[in-house]
Image: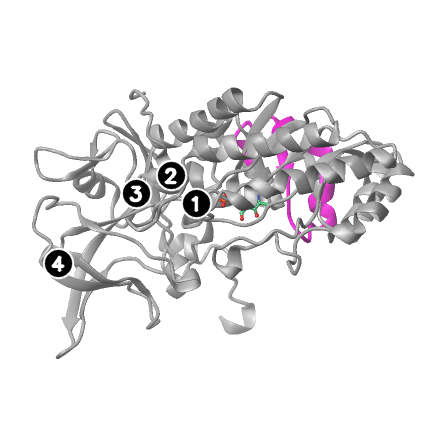
Amino acid sequence: MATLDKRSPNQQILPLTAKTNSNDHLEIGGCDVVELLQQYGSPLYILDEVSLRGACQQYRDAFKTHYQGESQVIYASKAWNCLAICAIVASEGLGIDVVSGGELFTAIKAGVNPELLYLHGNNKSESELEYAIACGCIIIIDNWLELKTASNLAESLGKCPRIMLRITPGIECHTHEYIQTGHLDSKFGFDPTEVESVFAFLSNQTALNCIGVHAHIGSQIFELQPHQDLGAVMIKWFKIAGKYGLNLTELNIGGGLGISYTESDDPPSITEWVKTVSNSVMAACEAEGLPLPKLISEPGRSLIGTACVTAYTIGGGKTVPQGRTYVTIDGGMSDNPRPITYQSQYLAMVANHMSAEADQVITIAGKHCESGDILIKDIKLPKTTAGDILVVPATGAYNYSMASNYNRIPKLAAVLVDSGEANLILKRETYEDLIRQDILPHKLR
Ligand SMILES: Cc1ncc(COP(=O)(O)O)c(C=O)c1O
């Protein structure tokens, strides 16, 4: 394993190990990106192990330094859930937040300790709840139906699962409206006006062991103030629980720390964020005269976002008279749906001519049958020709996990790179994979 770096990975656009090598090629984890594409095909997700492990360690170490009670970092695996990534974060001592039976299954198959798994979701099915109870993971209860279903299931299975309650904190933050979750008009969690009745319900039943409360205010947040405010709001819920004889011990403040996609992004470092949430919870406990809870955080994007790049091969293009120059790549919205979904901005570089002068303004178009499949509008890059390799950084979070097979395009392969070694962690889908679940009924044959 290459040595770790003190830079906060979420503040770097490229992975920590990225550099230009003597061939003027981009190198990540000691591997030449151009050679990786020759070996594994194009397009390709390239994940830097040093950046991912470094981010895990920075979160863990910062809580040890700044929080005086017990703490646990859990990886919000919705950012990118697969066997290898679950195994890496678990080996760094992190727990894992899952939001579906499928994510839970993957984490269990990766060998993650179920005691450190937290099941989220605003509409868990009975079978997902039953699976979670049988595994012994912690369930974050989102609403009344789920609370009652979990209680009935626990009783019939003769188990007493640990649960936490997701409550909407009523805290607004500045991010895309689709990834704001903490404001009152949100589909997630119990409304704060319901807190007393939920605790009253829990105080009268023994099938569920309520260990704490959870809130998540949104994603890709650069301000510290919303998280600064969160501690006091949540510790008040601890106080109310006490009135109903419930002894809560865990407080989960969610994730949300942003990352740098472009030079204009300026997120706080992992350490600054941890210090803010730690101080906020410690101050709130002191004000309310309560002992420090076990403090849980569940970052996703800031753990893995900048650890990965996507490398594409450039194809054709066109110049509109008196208009834009389009350059097309062999991927697009199916491997990175963020630009079309959230109008997200990205940078790019030509990985086989790293020091060439950027002397043209081009628009990078995806290959999908959709006018909106534009990865980057008006970016200054060196002259490119078909066959050049274009790298888009910061594609580790919500790219593979939100990828689709739109236009029946197979999902990409992913490699994990470290110290000059590359290991395949996701195989490229084949055309056969695409029709694996298709059925041609007899009458159509
Ligand atoms: C409940 C919950 N926890 C954690 C996260 C992770 O957020 P982020 O990737 O911004 O750290 C999310 C993502 O939106 C979430 O919904």
Q: Which mark is residue 10?
A: 2
Q: Is mark 4 within 8 Å of ligand 1?
A: no
The answer to whether residue 345 is above or below residue 107 is: below
282 or 356, which is in the foreground? Answer: 282
Task: Report the number of discs.
Answer: 4
Q: Quadrant of residue 134?
A: top right
Report the span colored magenta: 107-135
Label 2: few (<14), some or many (≥20) within 10 Å?
many
Question: Of the residues under marks 3 and 1, which one precedes in the sequence?
Answer: 3
Q: Is residue 97 visible?
A: yes
The answer to whether residue 24 is above or below residue 184 is: above
Q: Is mark 1 within 8 Å of ligand 1?
A: yes
224 left or right, relative to 260: right
Secondary structure of the residue carrying tag 4 is loop
Q: Position of residue 222 (x, y in %)?
A: 44, 46
349 left or right, relative to 11: left
Amino acid type at mark 4: Ala
Q: Is residue 425 visible?
A: no
Amino acid type at mark 2: Asn
Q: Residue at horizontal 45%, vertical 43%?
A: 301
The answer to whether residue 61 is above or below residue 391 is: above
Secondary structure of the residue carrying tag 1 is loop
Q: Are marks 2 and 4 in contact (CB under 8 Å)?
A: no
15 or 105, which is in the foreground? Answer: 15
Q: From mark 2 to mark 3, how far is it between C-alphas?
A: 8 Å
Q: Which mark is residue 74?
A: none
Amino acid type at mark 3: Ile
Q: Are marks 1 and 2 in contact (CB under 8 Å)?
A: yes
161 left or right, relative to 408: right
